Image (cartoon, coloured by chain):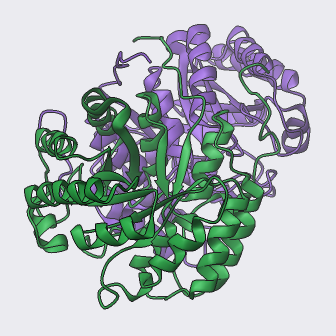
Chain colours: A purple, B green
């Protein structure tokens, strides 16, 4: 048994995706003014990357119809890096016009899930990323492009997703002009050993362009998976306040890693996130009020921070 | 960043402690016949270590008054290793008389918690272990003695618990004649980095006599902590079916790691536990019926096993 410690990253970024991945999966349509308050308070609590919505037709996702307005608002907050999801070139053009800092193009490595969810094959999405890149460059825009490879650990429709296919698609996204790539456990199939295995190879391929891990907590392993990713040097994670979210095309898949529990785990380990957890918990309470009747997740809000939080354990 | 993989253990044992740590923390008093069914079904599902109760006065814990009867029953099941908790010599004598396979003597490394919970200092408990060892040897009994160091990562009463004090007490328990030692995060203060740090030192001190990790999921980090312990070679963990449990003297501390989620994580990583998860989930449903009105925990029972469970990911 090796006793060598992997050094954990000194800092990490929690990208808030509750306003997109969270809200798109629940019935409640949050008024724009509440979303603004959420973004404002998350920024005040120290969050510096927020995915504020998705440029998709309002008839498909009325919950996110105000994405343009939210990008404009979020960009007024100092130091906030504003992301949006875009499913295609048309969405990409909207993101470029809105001057988002980053647009995430989702690709599903599961062909079955890709066809069901995006009505495209994974390679069609790669081709679309090339078109988005061309449009971005033609516009002289600075909006970064992230290719997000979902169902990277398996899929509720087709079952197993080949690891080499996940890595091939990630490489194809980079070749097509994605500035960043990320991996998502869309349906909560990952375990820490899988994460270590896949993320290590992904980081070898993409280097600094490997951007983010996105874990759902469907089977309770979300934070264990984050820890495994930290051990291979990944230090940016998507999370949803109150653990809302899921995937409408993945039966039983509910709940992203909760922002507040993730902030607690990282903070407890001495990994700097810049997030004030007390403020985050106060915000959670307000959002929970707005989302009355929806199923929320997370543990920290019930138990509160340990008395010892912020004190060093290793040197005790 | 080191890219060297720590090899995970090939096998692991889940010690079911729901009948003791779980039931002692909730109001429902489960009839002995239901407990027998629980033990029988857990054994049928492949569990081979069960803590069936605690030899404490019935007036203190009426929930566990039938411990002697349960030890006798559990010992009739082939290959089942039967544990009980004993707070003192008198309990130890009962465990010896009942011919339990192992008795766990809890020690709280937090002086404040120790006085509140056990009305003894930690060193008084060490002295009691020496007396239990003497009684065991005098009786020619084969009942093993495990010294369980609780509040090993901090305490809701006194806050920080000195790591060197935890290790000193563990060594003192070994010196006093404990055959095994274990560490418990009684109040859910541990994070994976703490676990790695403390467990690595503990294993160095106790070697093969380091027996078990006991994690509460109070703040959602239970399974991440198990993963960190696996990485330093520990492969026996306490867990409660449906995540019941807690500590009556630790406000807000609720929920052990749930047996079924732990079995899923271990099984998903290819770590052999001998546990049939489908049978465990069926048992959980029965126990949930018996405990109607109590707060239960866990994720897997809601989402079910992944379609890919049991298939190898790394070789895909």
Q: Position of residue B164 (x, y in %)?
A: 12, 38
Quarter of the picture containing the N terminus of chain A is top left
User: From what the image shows, is residue B236 above or below residue B238?
Assistant: above
Q: Nearer the viewer, residue B120 or B316?
A: B120
Task: Answer left or right for B256 relative to B103.
Answer: right
Q: Position of residue B52 (x, y in %)?
A: 49, 69
| Snapshot quadrant of residue A23 | bottom right
Task: Answer left or right for A124 relative to A133.
Answer: right
Q: Nearer the viewer, residue B52 or B150?
A: B52
User: From what the image shows, is residue B298 above or below residue A289?
Assistant: above
Q: Position of residue B58 (x, y in %)?
A: 35, 88
Q: Nearer the viewer, residue A280 or A160?
A: A160
| Snapshot quadrant of residue B291 | bottom right
Task: Answer left or right for B201 relative to A70.
Answer: left
User: Residue, x 81% and y 58% (percent of image)?
Assistant: A59
- Furthest-bottom residue in this view: B59
Q: Is residue A116 visible?
A: yes
User: Residue, x 67% and y 33% (percent of image)?
Assistant: B270
User: Residue, x 68% and y 39% (percent of image)?
Assistant: B268
**Total numbered labels placed on residues in the image:** 0
Quarter of the picture containing the C terminus of chain A is top left
Q: Is residue B88 visible?
A: no
Q: Position of residue A286 (x, y in %)?
A: 41, 70
User: Residue, x 64% and y 43% (percent of image)?
Assistant: B273
């Amino acid at each position: 048994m090796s006793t060598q410690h992997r050094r954990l990253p000194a800092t990490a970024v929690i990208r808030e995706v509750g306003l997109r991945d969270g809200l798109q999966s629940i019935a409640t349509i949050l008024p724009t003014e509440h979303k603004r308050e959420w973004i404002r308070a998350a920024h005040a609590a120290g969050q510096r990357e927020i995915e504020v919505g998705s440029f998709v037709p309002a008839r498909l996702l009325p919950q996110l119809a105000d994405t343009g307005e939210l990008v404009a608002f979020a960009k007024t907050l100092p130091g906030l890096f504003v992301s949006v999801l875009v499913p295609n070139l048309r969405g990409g053009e909207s993101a470029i016009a809105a001057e988002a800092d980053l647009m995430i193009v989702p690709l599903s490595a599961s062909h079955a899930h890709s066809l069901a969810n995006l009505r495209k094959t994974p390679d069609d999405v790669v081709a679309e990323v090339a078109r988005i890149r061309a449009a971005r460059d033609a516009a002289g825009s600075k909006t970064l492009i992230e290719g997000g490879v979902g169902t990277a650990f398996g899929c509720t429709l087709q079952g197993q997703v080949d690891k080499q296919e996940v890595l091939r698609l990630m490489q194809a996204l980079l070749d097509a002009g994605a500035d960043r790539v990320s991996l998502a456990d869309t349906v909560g199939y990952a375990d820490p050993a899988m994460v270590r295995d896949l993320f290590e190879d992904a980081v070898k391929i993409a280097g600094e362009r490997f951007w983010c891990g996105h874990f759902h907590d469907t089977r309770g392993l979300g934070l264990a998976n984050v820890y495994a990713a930290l051990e291979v040097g990944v230090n940016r994670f998507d999370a949803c306040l109150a653990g809302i979210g899921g995937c409408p095309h993945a039966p039983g898949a509910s709940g992203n890693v909760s922002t507040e529990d993730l902030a607690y785990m990282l903070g407890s380990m001495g990994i700097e996130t810049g997030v004030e957890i007390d403020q985050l918990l106060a915000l959670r309470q307000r959002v929970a009020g707005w989302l009355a009747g929806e199923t929320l997740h997370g543990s920290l809000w019930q138990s509160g921070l340990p008395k010892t939080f912020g004190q060093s354990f290793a040197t005790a």
